[in-house]
């Protein structure tokens, strides 16, 4: 289980990726583990309808990946699509500077 949309302040190592048109530093540790296990993996997203208060859970399943980068790109694509669809629903806008690449 990986929480991709949590700042990576204490990660031992990070890689640079693109999210919402900006460079972000994220740990590839969990995707690397998924590649080593050579099994299918899932991405899940939770949401809330701000008008009705109804919560949602969406699960995306993927076949085994050949690289951690492939998994990260799939996760970031889903996260970016979700944020772009309902920007007000993402609870970490206030933490955005902690995601941005430091160098």
Image (cartoon, rainbow, N blue to C red):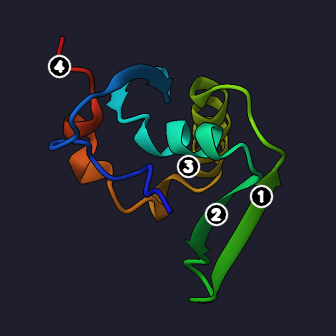
Q: Residues within 10 Å of mark 2 (few under 14, many from 20)?
A: some
Which residue is drawn at the image coordinates 65% and 25% (left, top)? 67
**Distance Cα–Cα, label 3 vs label 2:** 14 Å
Where's residue 27, x and y in %? 36, 36
Residue 34 location (% of width, % of height): 60, 45
Q: Which residue is mark 1?
A: 60
Q: Secondary structure at mark 2?
A: strand
Vertical side of 90 occupied by 76: above or below: above
Asked if marks 4 and 3 touch (Cβ < 8 Å), the reply is: no
Kindly identify the residue that appears in the image at 49 percent across and 64 percent down: 89
Q: Is residue 25 above or below residue 38?
A: above
- Mark 2 and mark 1 residues within 8 Å of each other at the beta carbon: yes
Label placed on residue 44: 2
Which residue is outermost to the front?
37
Q: Which residue is mark 4?
A: 102
Which residue occupies the extreme top position in the image? Answer: 103
Q: Residue at x 58, y 30 (%)?
A: 68
Label 3 belongs to which residue?
A: 83
Residue 33 versus residue 88: which sits nearer the camera?
33
Quick one: SS at disc 4?
Answer: loop
Q: CA distance from mark 1 to mark 4?
A: 31 Å
């Amino acid at each position: 289980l990986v929480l991709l949309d949590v700042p990576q302040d204490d990660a031992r190592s990070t890689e640079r990726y693109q999210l919402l048109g900006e460079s972000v530093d994220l740990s590839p540790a969990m995707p690397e583990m998924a590649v080593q296990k050579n099994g299918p993996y899932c991405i899940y997203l939770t949401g809330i309808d701000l008008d009705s208060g109804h919560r949602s859970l969406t699960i995306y399943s993927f076949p085994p990946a050949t690289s951690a980068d492939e998994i990260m790109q799939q996760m970031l694509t889903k996260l970016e699509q979700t944020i772009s669809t309902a920007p007000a629903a993402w609870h970490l806008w206030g933490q955005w500077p902690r995601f941005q690449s430091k160098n």
